[in-house]
Amino acid sequence: MKKILITGGAGFIGNNFIRYVLKKRKYRIINVDLLLFPSSFENIKDLMKVENYKFYKGDIKNYKFLLKIFKKEKNIDGVINFAAWSHVDKSILKPKDFIETNVYGVFNLLEIQKLGFFRRFLQISTDEVYGDLPYDTLDKFNEDSPLRPSSPYSSSKASADLLSLSYYKTYDLDILITRSSNNFGEYQFPEKLIPLTILKIIKNQKVPVYGNGRNVRDWIYVLDNVRGIMKVFEKGKSGNIYNIGGENEVTNLELVKKILYFFDRDESSIEFVKDRPGHDRRYSLDITKIKTQLYHKNIYDFEKFLKRTVYWYKNNLKWVEKCLDQNFKKYHLQNYNKRI
Ligand code: NAD
Ligand code: DAU
């Protein structure tokens, strides 16, 4: 049985990925996560008794720790790196964490690959590395578009992409990259727009929309990204980058109004707040490559799964409270707390 090591598998996408693979494939999964959020352990608790799954709490910044795991586990076929500090707002307030994990952590994994401890490395990246597009064009980013990251988060991810590609070229290692657009779905930490909006509505509080709400994001249901990642891991060509987008562009204002509608609320529940510094205007991914070369097709309808996500949060308020209670006090910067 093939063995893959997932980093960041207690987070939003990694957790959804592990559940998908355990259900659909025959792989042994090793999950390495620092459990930055108290909700993280909650996310993976029920997996502990699953036969083909093993969890290690640890930090990808810690080279010695990683080496120990790779020596102990032996014969790992591939590594998929989801582990990262992932929120743009936090990166603006505290960039150091982002550079340390998102760049130096990736460097550690690449160094271990160079020693021959595993064959294939898939780096999970983001559409944000391309920077933004103007509002009034139909332009899209393809995999050859220049990298023009705007935030400390996106520049840390772009750095990791470049480092990975340099290891592919210089050391002839088997390395790939996926760049996806904004994911939504179950288990997303309620600092991000969709779960935050749902939570604010449930609590009868105003929904904060940055600036004028015209910014456009291309939303993809998390399981379509997970399916794309698996396709790339199993069938992708080494040295290649694959965009994974939802082909579903919506302004933030439209999106918030859609969620308000599920609760029978109107625009009066919105509060336009100070804009995010350096706020990217529009993201749009050209996903021709993954469609034509790997025959990947999105299967989850946006409206239907947005509604399902709203119900999931409504039915999992205990999980949400757990995220907020301990986590926001402990880890998330004083300024950030003011928004919540
Ligand atoms: P998340 O914040 O929910 O999860 C990240 C996980 O990484 C957490 O469980 C955290 O504990 C872990 N982690 C952080 N630092 C670590 C470290 N030093 N060592 C070990 N584990 C560590 O993020 P997510 O939304 O699931 O994103 C996963 C990946 O996908 C990230 O690399 C992100 O850049 C990328 N991505 C996310 C989206 C999105 O819309 N969420 C879109 C494109 C790309
Ligand atoms: O594009 C992919 C990226 O999507 C990923 O690489 C990141 O890991 C992921 O976190 C996400 O990026 P952001 O960190 O920008 O997501 P967020 O949900 O915070 O913001 C989405 C949009 O909503 C953005 O235009 C800012 C806006 N927003 C966000 C919040 C939290 C608001 O208007 N109000 C808010 O309160």
Image (spheres, helix red, strand yellow):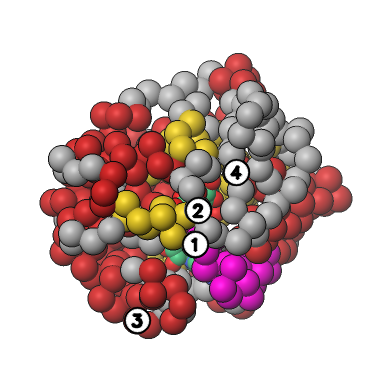
Residue that mark 4 sits on: 281
Quadrant assignment, res 25: top left
Mark 3, other Cα within 10 Å: few <14 / some 14–19 / many ≥20: few
Closer mark to the observer between disc 4 and disc 1? 1
- As shown in the figure, which amino acid type bears the numbered disc 4? Arg
Instruction: Say if mark 1 contacts mark 2, CB within 8 Å.
Output: yes
Q: Earlier in the sequence, mark 2 or mark 4?
A: 2
Secondary structure under the numbered disc 3 in the rendered image: helix
Name which of mark 3 and mark 4 comes first in the sequence: 4
Query: Is 304 positioned to the left or the right of 137 in the image?
Result: left
- Where is mark 1, residue-wise? 274
Say which label, 4 or 1, has the lower sequence index. 1
- x and y percent of residue 205 in the render? 23, 61
| Picture coordinates of residue 50, whole percent (x, y) | 26, 54
Q: CA distance from mark 3 to mark 4?
A: 31 Å
Residue 81 position, x and y percent, is 55, 54
Mark 1 residue crowding within 10 angstroms, few (<14) / some (14–19) / many (20+): few
| Vertical relation: 314 (above or below) 252 | below
Please tell me the numbered disc located at residue 329.
3
Residue 309: tell me if it is visible. no
Magenta region, mostly helix, strand or loop?
A: helix
Q: Residues within 10 Å of mark 4 (few under 14, many from 20)?
A: some
Label 3, label 2: how many angstroms apart (C-alpha)?
A: 26 Å
